[in-house]
Image (tube, rainbow, N blue to C red):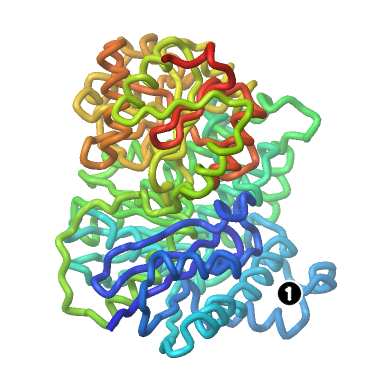
Amino acid sequence: MNKYYIGLSVTYHDSALAIIDAQGDVLFAEATERYLQNKRALNCEPDQLFLVPDLLKQYCPAPDEFVIAINWRKKRPVYESAVSRLGFLSAPGLLKTGIKKLRSPLENYQLHHMMACQRNSILAAGINLVRIIREYYPGCKIAFADYDHHLTHAATACYSSPFDQAACAVIDSYGEKGAMAFYRYNHQKLERLHETKGIGTGSLGLYYMKITELCGFDWLKGEEWKVMGLAPYGKFDQELYELLQSVICVNGFDCKHPAKPLFQSLTRLERFRRPKDRPIEQAADCAYTGQVFFAELVTKLLNHLYEVTQCENLALAGGCALNSSFNGQITGRTAFRQVYIPSAPADDGCALGAAWLSYYAEHSNHRKQPKLLTSYTGSSIASDAMERFLKFNRSLHVQHLPGSVCDITAGLLATGKLVGWIQGRAEFGPRALGNRSILADPRSAATRDHINQKIKFRESFRPFAPSVLHEYAADYFENYQESPYMDKTLSIKKAMRERIVAVCHIDGTGRLQTVKEDWNPRFYHLLNSFYQLTQIPVLLNTSFNVMGKPLVHSLEDAVAVFLTTGLDVLVINDYLITKSPDESIE
């Protein structure tokens, strides 16, 4: 019988869809924003009506049964249900007064808006998918499952990891009961050790969102990245640090807001808010101090987790696991010796966790050899789109270079060309890992500025990532740790910083991607070819998009970015495309 397990992340932001087969293997996983080309896909269902038929046809041949699993419990928490009945989770309800202020860094209307959007997403979960299955596969059975949100995070982290055993921390903005959960993972079994409870308990996710606001950025757009990029330009502010201590603290597995001075402290925090008309640099001290305090809090939580589990392997998930600036410090600040963070640790990854939980609910005794899950589970460039492009293109110079495209592209990179690089299937998660990337030579600081100004159209303080051949990574990074998904920021050795200056941040760090041949043979070949030419085993790697847009999804997306930015070269699989014949190599 052909049975498929479809996981839906129905969080109102970063929704996603994943498909697992009857053997528990991942067939497909991708965030909705890619298909829609709508950053974060706010309030967009993961099972898009025009997308689902093609996905089922491609990945679910001759289906007999489907299980549709979602990443939130349908039974909602008491507080959410109560304020919904009172009318606070509606448009007019956001304007209502007379309700007690929640003990949170955010305003009630912001929290209620999130709850309302989340509630609507759960209510509509799977409705498009069921309609399509009924229409295209009327004889199929359909079963449904819903799971605790933090458990789906933990499942994604642990089932995709190389570990048989691990301690697992899920650190988020909120779940059904609270903002965090901690687990012991043992041979595909997840045991919950602790879950924080209550809307008024401390949330590190909401704390970081507040820091993002104070810096003048927008967390709804996912601009926490900017805080991490800006932080190294700042210095420690003792007054702000002490004020943050009065807002949130850690005790064991719990984050808490101190009993009395919270609201007074939050009011005092407002003096650190950067006005929108002031230079971004004025927020650097806030970003730096906020990041330092965040790292201290998470360190306390993880040290307590180690004390409880005595396991040296850590699997980390939840939105806070995207804090690569801290992730690279974990082995130095805790007793954990190996740290694994999935390619999609935030809510998009929960689609995979939900699918896996529904699979193991029926195959509890099925044992799989643990191995690192590939991140390349998304869509490919449609072959018919490439055929149309070759047929109707009248302006771009196209070369078909099977067998030599990596070597020729490496040569162009070595001469300073900026390359849009698309290969195979897209990455699952927020980072470009060599299949939907913009690549450049890391040896010149001017390259960094050129990409920010003429391709990404973003702030000058935003750093770029070094993709590095694993064999040489220890020569370039202090206390090197493998970082397959660009999930850790490490210090670049002083002797190497000038050699790869375009990917060296102001504090001497780089958020690296480890590249191994068995993980991505084509990208490894390109990097190795560049190394043979330059003796530098590193490329500058950033996502193939412009600021405010997701990674490119279709051929049309890629060509549009190519034609409207300062990119010199576009490579799609074996095709090398330039804007004029003079820019290519015959």
Of 288 and 135, the residue lying toward us: 135
> Residue visible at 55% across and 39% down?
225
> Residue visible at 26% across and 42% down?
519
Q: Is residue 286 left or right of residue 349?
A: right
Residue 565: x, y in percent?
64, 26
Residue 110: x, y in percent?
71, 60
**Count of number-bearing discs:** 1
Q: Which residue is mark 1?
A: 89
Quarter holding the C terminus? top left
Task: Determine whether 226 is above or below 413 in the image.
Answer: below
Residue 440, quarter of picture:
top left
Q: Is residue 310 left or right of residue 214?
A: left
Residue extending furthest front?
A: 391
Question: Mark 1, residues whose alpha carbon is within 10 Å: few (<14), some, or many (≥20)?
Answer: many
Can the viewer see residue 404? Answer: yes
> Residue visible at 48% across and 53% down?
319
Q: Is residue 401 left or right of residue 72?
A: left
Instruction: Identify the amino acid type marked 1.
Output: Leu
Of 90 and 61, the residue lying toward us: 61
Residue at disc 1, secondary structure: loop
Residue 346: x, y in percent?
47, 55
Residue 367, quarter of picture:
bottom left
Task: Determine whether 502 is above or below 258 in the image.
Answer: above
Of 304 and 69, the residue lying toward us: 69
